[in-house]
Image (cartoon, rainbow, N blue to C red):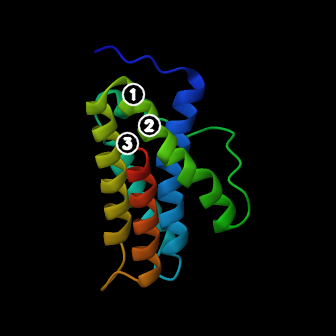
């Protein structure tokens, strides 16, 4: 199956995935936000398939806002929209996108020392919920 993604579709996917890593980094600020962001970013750039090609570049020119709430207002709906878009065109790529984002979330979480903080666990839950809303 051939998937046709317009430039705006690619921006939505990048905003969703890279934004999810940013949300996890913000939620992990009590530990090492930088390490969480780095680990999550490595997971995104390690993706394969169509998703891997799209996520190879971070989104350019996206204004996430100044608070985590403003970031979440953009990213969580973009996660849902990305899943819906990909599911419509190629369900296998929708699954690939979901797994890629969840691996990035897990990688960001594992970057922390010791037990996962409640803040990071809650952010991971919100990201998973947004992904599942588009299924």
How crowded pointer 2 is (Cα within 10 Å; few <14, some 14-19, many 20+) is rated as: some
Please state which of residues 117 and 40 is positioned toward the viewer in this rendering.
117
Q: Which mark is residue 88?
A: 1
Where disc 3 sits, the SS reads helix
Q: Are marks 2 and 1 in contact (CB under 8 Å)?
A: yes
Q: Residue at x 32, y 63 (%)?
A: 106
Q: Residue at x 40, y 83 (%)?
A: 117
Q: Which residue is mark 3?
A: 45
Tell me the quadrant of the picture where the N terminus can be found.
Answer: top left
- Please state if 64 lies on the left or on the right of 76 as rendered: right
The label nearer to you, 3 versus 1, is: 1
Picture layout, residue 18 above or below residue 50 = below
Residue 28 visible from this viewpoint: yes
Q: Are marks 3 and 1 in contact (CB under 8 Å)?
A: no
Say whether disc 3 or disc 1 marks the residue closer to the N-terminus: 3
Residue 56 visible from this viewpoint: no
On the image, the x and y values in percent for residue 46 come to: 31, 42
Please state which of residues 79 and 56 is positioned toward the viewer in this rendering.
79
Q: What's the distance in space between the residues labelled 2 and 3, CA to CA?
A: 22 Å
Where disc 1 sits, the SS reads helix
Say whether disc 2 or disc 3 marks the residue closer to the N-terminus: 3
Please state which of residues 88 and 34 is positioned toward the viewer in this rendering.
88
Please state which of residues 58 and 74 is positioned toward the viewer in this rendering.
74
Where disc 2 sits, the SS reads helix
């Amino acid at each position: 199956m051939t998937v046709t993604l317009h430039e705006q579709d690619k921006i939505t996917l990048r905003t969703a995935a890279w934004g999810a890593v940013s949300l996890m980094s913000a939620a992990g600020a009590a530990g090492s936000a930088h390490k969480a962001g780095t680990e999550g970013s490595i997971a995104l750039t390690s993706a394969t398939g169509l998703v891997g090609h799209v996520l190879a570049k971070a989104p350019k020119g996206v204004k996430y806002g100044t608070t985590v709430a403003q970031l979440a207002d953009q990213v969580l709906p973009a996660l849902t929209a990305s899943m819906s878009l990909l599911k419509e065109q190629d369900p296998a790529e929708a699954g690939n996108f979901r797994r890629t984002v969840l691996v990035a979330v897990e990688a960001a979480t594992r970057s922390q020392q010791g037990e996962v903080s409640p803040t990071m666990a809650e952010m991971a839950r919100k990201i998973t919920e947004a992904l599942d809303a588009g299924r």
